[in-house]
Image: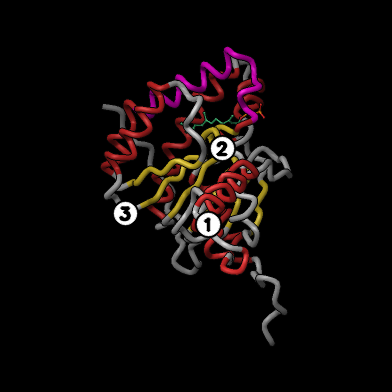
């Protein structure tokens, strides 16, 4: 058996832990390119890293982790890359879901499963069913997800339910999103130095702290997550109000 590498002890006792962390996992391709490897090797390294970050979230007592796994726009990537990504998602759902279940992870899906390969759809449904009673960490996987499409979907459902203009509130609107019942993200991390929101949680992240980092996703490790939490604690969240009196 391989010995586990010794983990550095990271003390978060003096900090507020964000309840909900959202991550745009970017830079798998560039991580691979820098090593002279194919893009698929970058996505595999990204999937391994996700496992580490989920464990770190459990360790740090983060309650909700939302990850952007595949956007509605990602279907436009070369067919071989899309196929490779689907293979990784299927493998994680087949093999790693048991370990996630044992860690107390409850899987949710954000997005639209119609149009996705039926076998993969079935794996997603089975994984959700298997982990539905877990309460250590909610893992929202945004897959075939787009923020504008989510809002349109919510509006269509509200119209179908006969919600009238007078009764519509932000709370009612939120309850029609894929994240219904969950608090909004406190922090949105984007790896690989990009500074865009890319149609991710555009309603829910209205007051989230945005944390861009240069690290490519496969290199965004437990210590990088720790740094993000420390930075979050240095922000002054005002929610549109004036600063506290000194
Ligand atoms: C961005 O890298 C990453 C993605 C397209 C998302 C795929 C994520 C994974 C495979 C991680 C594991 C996720 C799950 C749900 C198992 P990029 O290809 O956009 O990088 P680049 O901008 O450097 O080309």
Residue 120, quarter of picture: top left
Ligand 1, what quadrant? top right
What range of the chain is rendered magenta? 73-93
Residue 82, quarter of picture: top right
Q: Residue 78, how many percent across, how many down?
A: 64, 15
The kind of secondary structure the magenta stretch mainly shows is helix
Q: Determine whether 125 is above or below 172 in the image.
A: above
Q: Determine whether 103 is above or below 87 in the image.
A: below
Report the residue at 59% width, 55% height from top.
204
> Mark 3 and 1 residues: CB-CB less than 8 Å, in contact?
no
Whether residue 188 is visible to the viewer of this picture, yes or no, is yes
Label 2, on which residue? 145
In the image: residue 70, left or right of residue 63? right
Q: Residues within 10 Å of mark 1 (few under 14, many from 20)?
A: few
The first of marks 2 and 1 along the sequence is 2
Report the residue at 53% width, 65% height from top.
171
Q: Determine whether 24 is above or below 80 in the image.
A: below
């Amino acid at each position: 058996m391989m010995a586990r590498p010794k983990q550095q002890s990271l003390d978060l006792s003096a900090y507020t832990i964000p309840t909900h962390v959202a991550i745009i996992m970017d830079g798998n391709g560039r991580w691979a390119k820098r090593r002279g490897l194919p893009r698929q090797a970058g996505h595999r390294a990204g999937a391994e890293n996700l496992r580490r970050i989920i464990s770190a979230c459990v360790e740090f007592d983060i309650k909700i982790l939302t990850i952007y796994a595949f956007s509605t726009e990602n279907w436009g990537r070369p067919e071989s890359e899309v196929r490779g990504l689907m293979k990784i998602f299927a493998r994680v759902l087949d093999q790693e879901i048991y370990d996630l279940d044992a860690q107390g992870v409850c899987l949710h899906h954000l997005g639209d499963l119609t149009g996705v390969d039926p076998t993969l759809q079935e794996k997603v449904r089975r994984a959700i069913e298997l982990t539905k009673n877990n309460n250590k960490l909610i893992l929202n996987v945004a897959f075939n997800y787009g923020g504008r499409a989510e809002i349109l979907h919510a509006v269509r459902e509200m119209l179908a339910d006969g919600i009238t203009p007078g009764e519509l509130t932000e709370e009612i609107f939120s309850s029609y999103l894929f994240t219904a019942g969950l608090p909004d993200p406190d922090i949105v991390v984007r790896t690989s130095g990009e500074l865009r929101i890319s149609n991710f949680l555009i309603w829910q992240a209205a007051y989230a702290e945005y944390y861009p980092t240069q690290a490519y996703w496969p290199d965004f490790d437990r210590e990088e997550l720790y740094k993000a939490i420390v930075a979050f604690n240095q922000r002054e969240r005002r929610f549109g109000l004036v600063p506290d009196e000194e």
